[in-house]
Image (cartoon, helix red, strand yellow):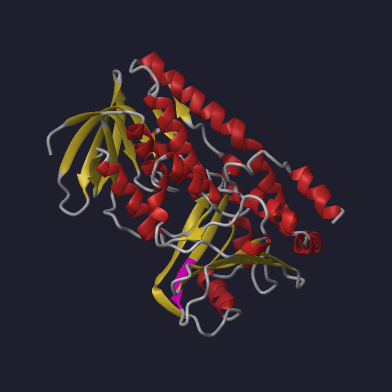
Amino acid sequence: MANTHYDFAIVGAGPAGSACANALLLEGASSVALIDRARFPRDKICGDGIGPGVIAILDVLQLRDILDGHRRVKQMVMTGPLGGQMTLDDNQITNQSPLGYVIRRTEFDHALVTAAMRRGCANMTGWSLETAAHVGDRWRLDLTESDSGEPCSVTADVLIGADGATSRVRRLLGQPFNLERHVSVAIRVLASTKPPFRARQELNVAEELPIPGYAWNFATGSGTVNVGFVCDTPTYKAHGRHLREILETYKSLLPSTLAYDDSTRHSQILPLASQMPPLAYPAIGAALIGDAASMINPLTGEGIFYGMEAGLQLGRRLSGATKTQEGLAHALVRYEREFRRTFTWHFRGNYYLRKLIEKPVLFERMLRAGAKKSELCCDCIEYMMGNESGVGKKPLYHLALNTMFA
């Protein structure tokens, strides 16, 4: 491959990177490269939940058709270690629904990448970033073809790191990995069931599992169920149990009709947004988004909405900036300022809510209050999952007061 120059080089073609590429191209950017060591479709370890915030972003990116053929979640259930349960059915919702979809990331991420390529993005999936350096007024990226080892180099005015939890771009920008207390670990396995469960999401805090931490089982509605567990690293280490053993314990609590595919069992580390690195580097034309920027909810482990929102915001800012070093630098600064203004208190509130799970009596109170009032249940789910209307709309004290007096 001959050396090529791009206005924007995005390393990482997951939802954050692909959303950024789509936003740039939709707003008129003419030269975007999407780089990823994987070839798509590829698997991604997560719960496969797609919330209303993501749906809104797809609308803005004119990609709502990605959801065609999928069943919207009909029910969300949360249970606690003392027997409390909060259930929200779609027929109880009178306002905007906090329920979304369960879609395999293999399919969802591939659809986002394909849309970016269709809009003219340079397809450099299957190429691994080896190193990058800012020289003069541009970035030089040295890449290797994942299969053959063939080397190539490209240059770019702006480098965007969207390359996941173990981001190489983040390290090249001089940012260390999160401290242990700001990292979670997760494990996931896929199962099938006949007849299919209806599309639903269930979150379980159970005395048989490490607390604070929760397990999940999310059903697509078409016969696939995503089953997993997540907790923060200090909790995991304190309990002294292997993730695989914890998952087996959770599986024993689920219906025996589930048939597990052990080849899909994988673990993942999650850098939490309670310790985000700097997001923008205006002096050298660089930015971080998604998991590379620790944009993962400290309570739920959810990251796809925040990563795609960051990609959308950054893409819009950059595409509207003058193509000068000063113009691009200003856009990068505004991106970080606006993202933090929107989400800092949201992430902080969810970090505090995680502490609530440590006290089963308080968590039980929240579940029982939500079980009595579907509106409060909706508010709790919106606050924990994040979406375009819920972030910042009803602060944590609103949920606390409503829980106390429900």
Quarter of the image with the C terminus in it: bottom right
Up-down relation of residue 262 to residue 55 (above or below): below
Instruction: Where is residue 126? Give x, y as percent.
Output: 24, 50
Between 128 and 32, the one lying in front of the other is: 32
Answer with left or right where residue 93 lies relative to residue 233: right
Instruction: Where is residue 95? Give x, y as percent.
Output: 66, 51
Magenta segment: does it hold 191? Answer: yes
The residue under the point 42% across, 19% down is 329
SS assignment for the magenta stretch, majority: strand
Which stretch is magenta? Answer: 188-192
Count of numbered circles in the view: 0
- Is residue 162 visible from the viewing direction of this image? no
Magenta segment: does it hold 195? Answer: no
Up-down relation of residue 300 to residue 129 (above or below): below
Quarter of the image with the N terminus in it: top left
> Which quadrant of the figure has residue 140?
top left
Instruction: Where is residue 49? Give x, y as percent.
Output: 51, 58
Answer with left or right where residue 160 lies relative to residue 349: left
The residue under the point 47% across, 46% down is 291
The residue under the point 57% across, 72% down is 246
Which residue extends farthest bottom?
256
Which residue extends farthest right?
405
> Which quadrant of the figure has residue 343?
top right
- Is residue 132 visible from the viewing direction of this image? yes
Instruction: Where is residue 322? Give x, y as percent.
Output: 36, 17
Answer with left or right where residue 153 lies relative to residue 232: left
